[in-house]
Amino acid sequence: MSNTLNNTDLIKLNREFGIGDQLTFTEGPAGFILAEIKNPHGEATVALHGGHVLSFRPRGHEPVLWLSRNSHFQTGRAIRGGIPVCWPWFADHPTDADKPAHGFARTADWAVSESEKLEDGSIRLRLFIADSEKTMKLWPHRFRLEMDCTVSDVLRTKLISTNTDNKPSVCGGALHSYFNISFISAIRITGLEDCSYIDKVDQGRRKVQNGAVSINSETDRIYLDTKADCIIEDSGLPRRICISKNGSLTTVVWNPWVDKAAAMKDFGNDEYKRMVCVETVNADTDVIELAPGDTHTLESIIRLESLTEG
Ligand code: BG6
């Protein structure tokens, strides 16, 4: 099924997977199909284009995820903001610069496979893609990739990769989360202290993080061997965004700052002040080897805490 609007598809989706007024399928920008989730604890929107969580907000709070006002909503292009799914490689393809950055999952047409209301009132939605003639040209492996998200006052997102081929495969990936912040100078990120990182804006030099991360220039860092929760402390809102994870030993922190923001068509010139990416990643030495039939789950769990907690 294509992820742009067709009324019959919408009626079918709502009939098969809708859950009262808590999970409905609607038409979004450019006719994209959106899953709108709303329950007493929180709300989220998921686009079938890219299997992409666009927004998340616990009830009574400001949005947790950031979405660019200039984002493309166009077939074949990635959405700027929310949680793009990067897969089966992270960033540039390791050997072929003509292949799309961050893989093909974020621009693919995803389909819905499951939805349910859990006992605690959360709504769970599962989407998937699988290999096709098109994906085989970019990555010659048979696979099934699922994006499973559970929405309450916490957003739990799982990226589940299964090797359905009869030969091994190696994949990287990310839940490339963009967070909404009050102001870039009002935040600091904890949880990466003493971790080694690759500094992509300083010729890939290896460095060690000293104290919390503050951002006051272009930042693009691949932190290695990261296991702890990351916390974005935002004195402006004021709140803490806590990002826990499973199945990932890599965390990427990214902010394009002035020049790079201005060079990107789908990013407002001043928007770098209101966002930061803290990404749950498999990359570098943390790529995943899957034997035939094997599955790997990359999971990110995002919750808010008030600044006085913890
Ligand atoms: C980050 C990378 O994950 O994504 C950056 O570390 C990259 O190098 C950024 O610039 C955005 O990538 P894209 O392909 O969405 O513009």
Image (tube, grey):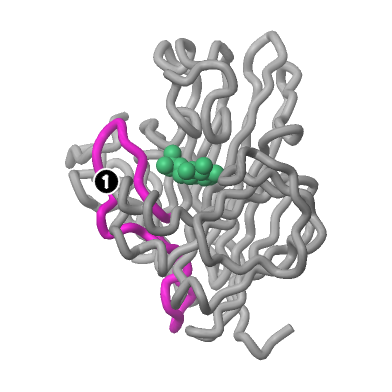
Name which residue lies at 41% across and 69% down.
Answer: 274
Q: Position of residue 97 (x, y in %)?
A: 47, 20
Q: Secondary structure at mark 1?
A: loop
Crowd rating for badge 1 (residues with CA inside 10 Å; few <14, some 14–19, many 20+): few
Name the residue furthest bottom.
308
108 above or below 266? above
Q: Position of residue 212 (x, y in %)?
A: 70, 69
Name which residue lies at 49% across and 74% down.
Answer: 58
Q: Residue 66 appears in which quarter of the rendering? A: bottom left
The secondary structure that most of the magenta stretch takes on is loop
Pick the residue in front: 95 or 142: 95
Q: Residue 155 appears in which quarter of the rendering? A: bottom right
Would you say residue 200 sits in the magenta stretch? Answer: no
Name which residue lies at 58% across and 14% down.
Answer: 141
Q: Indicate left or right for 289 with 14 as reference.
A: right
Pick the residue in front: 259 or 249: 259
Name which residue lies at 19% across and 44% down.
Answer: 31
Residue on which disc 1 sits: 265
Disc 1 C-beta below 8 A from ligand 1: no
Q: Indicate left or right for 12 with 252 as reference.
A: left
Q: Amino acid at mark 1?
A: Lys
Pick the residue in front: 269 or 91: 269
Quarter in which the C terminus is drawn? bottom right
Q: Position of residue 47 (x, y in %)?
A: 36, 47
Would you say residue 81 sits in the magenta stretch? Answer: yes
Q: Residue 294 appears in which quarter of the rendering? A: top right
Pick the residue in front: 302 or 190: 190
Q: Position of residue 300 (x, y in %)?
A: 63, 54
Q: Which residues are magenta?
A: 55-82
Total numbered badges shown on the rendered structure:
1
